[in-house]
Image: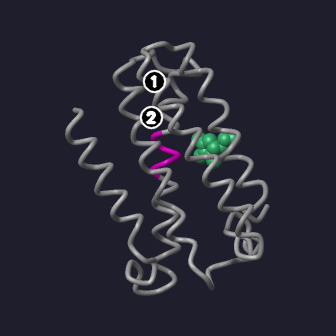
Amino acid sequence: MIRPMVALTALVAAAAAMPAAAQFQKPEDAVKYRQSAMFLLANHFGRVGAMVQGRVPYDAAAASANADIVSTISHLPFAGFVDGTASTEKGKAKASIWSDRAKFDAAAKKMQEETAKLAAAAKTNSLDNLKAAFGPVGQTCKGCHDDFRNQ
Ligand code: ASC
């Protein structure tokens, strides 16, 4: 399992480094891209959450595999926040993402740091460590949604 994950991480890093303009044919594709990345992020974070909250039995290998995916995918959504894709619709990206970009970027970085800590905690095979690292990730999700997603 180690080799494919290293290869996937390298691939994702390369994809994330590509210029957004080259990556998306049209603005709607960028929106679909970031929503798809966040859908996967929520799904895999949710699988870890189910163990943390005792809804499914703790399985250290599954927790680690999912936390690794969360950490890897945490780098993807941000290339999709291209100019001209703000909205005033509930649940959609607010204009403040672009007018307060430094704060948005810092929030993204914080989320990526916390997901890396979650992946590291999962590798200790300790449910207590996993639990301790889970909350801070959720806080970074929520913080960014509170600030940058239309309520
Ligand atoms: C999730 C999810 C979020 C965050 C947030 C944490 O699983 O989809 O947006 O966690 O609810 O507070």
- Give the residue pinned by disc 2: 67
Q: Nearer the viewer, residue 41 or 89?
A: 41
- Give the residue pinned by disc 1: 122
Secondary element type, mark 2: helix
Relative height, residue 1 to residue 24 (above, below): above
Q: Quadrant of residue 130?
A: top right
Q: Earlier in the sequence, mark 1 or mark 2?
A: 2
Amino acid identity at mark 2: Ala
Q: Residue 79 location in percent, x, y?
A: 50, 69
What's the magenta region? 40-44
Q: Quadrant of residue 137?
A: top right
Relative height, residue 19 to residue 4 (above, below): below
Who's the residue at 59% across and 21% down the image? Answer: 131
Left or right of residue 61, residue 97 in this image: right
> Which quadrant of the picture is home to ligand 1?
top right
Q: Are marks 1 and 2 in contact (CB under 8 Å)?
A: yes
For the C terminus, give its image quadrant. Answer: bottom right
